[in-house]
Image (spheres, rainbow, N blue to C red):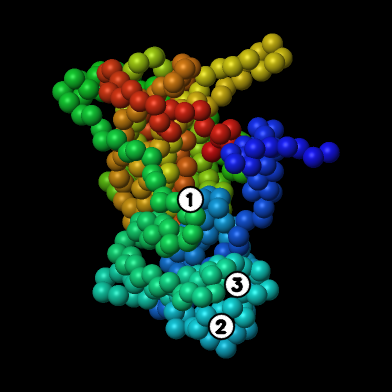
Amino acid sequence: MINHCNYANPRPLPWLLMLLFTSITLAADDAPKSKVAIFPLAGDAPVDLRERVGFSLRSKLDREATYEAVSGIEMTEAVEGIDSPVSFATPVDAVDDLSKPLAADVVIWGELSKKDAGHALAVKVFDFRALDTLPFEIRQQIDQPTDVRFVSERVLEHLADVKRFEHPTEEAVTDDAASAALWAANPNLVVNGGFDEAGHWERIFKAERHPVRLGSALPDYDKIVIYTMTEADGTPNKVLAMQLSRATAEGPGLAALSEPIAIQPDTRYRLQFRYRSGGPKLHIFVKGYTNVPDGKGGTIEREIYRRQVPPTGGTDRQWVTIIDDLNPQHVNRPVQHLRVSLYTYLHPGLVMFDDVMLKAVGGQTRKAVDAAIDLPATRPVR
């Protein structure tokens, strides 16, 4: 059968357009991700810093979801036994030979070297899908360990289809006489925020959840205890102590999660805590929940709000106080209770927490519809 149509003004049939669109969408969803091989960095910077930059590049690339990063173990095996490290001066042909077994579409290689009081990163990026181009050269300065996060993003933004990285809005504390008076007068809503006894906090590690208990010694790797330390003035003080191994710091991280904290609607809260870190970085969250039917006649908590406290790093084992305001809300559901998640990652070592407080400090200062109050994807609590 021949279908007749007006060729002077062709109009594809609606069902044909829908079929074509569906086919393209399915093909795009099923298509494998392009692989990126990030070679171990050469240079005279400390090995742990060079490894940290490589780890940051791979983890951010994985989270970005456009590409698939070749694992660090595979990259280490790829360069095992070669005569000299892959450096910024290594020609693309040599890098090509090493990356062929990995089936990589894009390669990143270079070096991190000492420069003045910081370090200089020099890398090359080459896309084998565009053979008529030269490797793109990127140079970045790392003055502080916390710069690694942003330097990694600047490098990855040079890859095709990688959008500019964005970060959650980090609001300053709205500190005035009224909120200061409420802070002084209102009770601390965090149960056992001073870690004076066992319980009321859970250790979250991968899929494991266990109550935090008292310990007579500092915790083993990837464990959490309430430990009695001796302050500089000689007084004993109970604190929450975490010990991170390198594998955990560079992998799932470790967290302590508080008991549920009941809150009032349209109320602003202030979080304050002290911590000291010999290396681990903090990524503290205050998470908000509502109770929904579980289909069995009961209810289950569902996360509908998340406040990210601006990340902080090592403190050279000195106590540092962190203060942050939050406006728990959701576009169409009430936030009924909060939990404080003391999450640490990135660097191995010991970190301690004390005096975790959450108090009401007045009316909300922010009403908006954005990623901070949209329903997040369901994830294990950590």
Give the numbered dot on residue 160. none
Label 3: element kind: helix
Give the number of callouts.
Answer: 3
Mark 1 surroundings within 10 Å by alpha-carbon count, few (fewer than 14), some (14 through 19), many (20 or more)? many
Side of 357 relative to 105 (left or right)? left
Label 2: element kind: helix
Given residues 53 and 256, the one toward you in this image is 53
- The relative height of residue 185 versus residue 28 in the rendered view (above or below) is above
Residue at (47%, 17%) from the top-left corner? 332
From the image, tell me which residue sits under label 3: 76
Given residues 217 and 205, the one toward you in this image is 205
- The relative height of residue 106 versus residue 380 in the rendered view (above or below) is below
Q: Is residue 193 visible?
A: no
Spatial separation of the CA atoms under disc 2 and disc 3: 19 Å
Q: Position of residue 263 (x, y in %)?
A: 41, 17
Q: Position of residue 305 (x, y in %)?
A: 46, 27
From the image, tell me which residue sits under label 2: 93
From the image, tell me which residue sits under label 1: 345
Given residues 194 and 259, the one toward you in this image is 259
Residue at (31%, 51%) from the top-left corner? 318
Query: Which part of the image, by quadrant, shows the C terminus?
Result: top right
Spatial separation of the CA atoms under disc 2 and disc 1: 37 Å
Q: Give, as a three-letter code, the residue at label 3.
A: Thr
Who comes first in sequence, dot 2 or dot 1?
Answer: 2
Q: Give, as a three-letter code, the residue at label 1.
A: Tyr
Who comes first in sequence, dot 2 or dot 3?
Answer: 3
Q: Position of residue 61 (x, y in %)?
A: 52, 56
Q: Give, as a three-letter code, the residue at label 2.
A: Asp
Residue at (54%, 74%) from the top-left corner? 131
Who comes first in sequence, dot 1 or dot 3?
Answer: 3
Q: Residue furthest right?
A: 1
Mark 3 surroundings within 10 Å by alpha-carbon count, few (fewer than 14), some (14 through 19), many (20 or more)? few
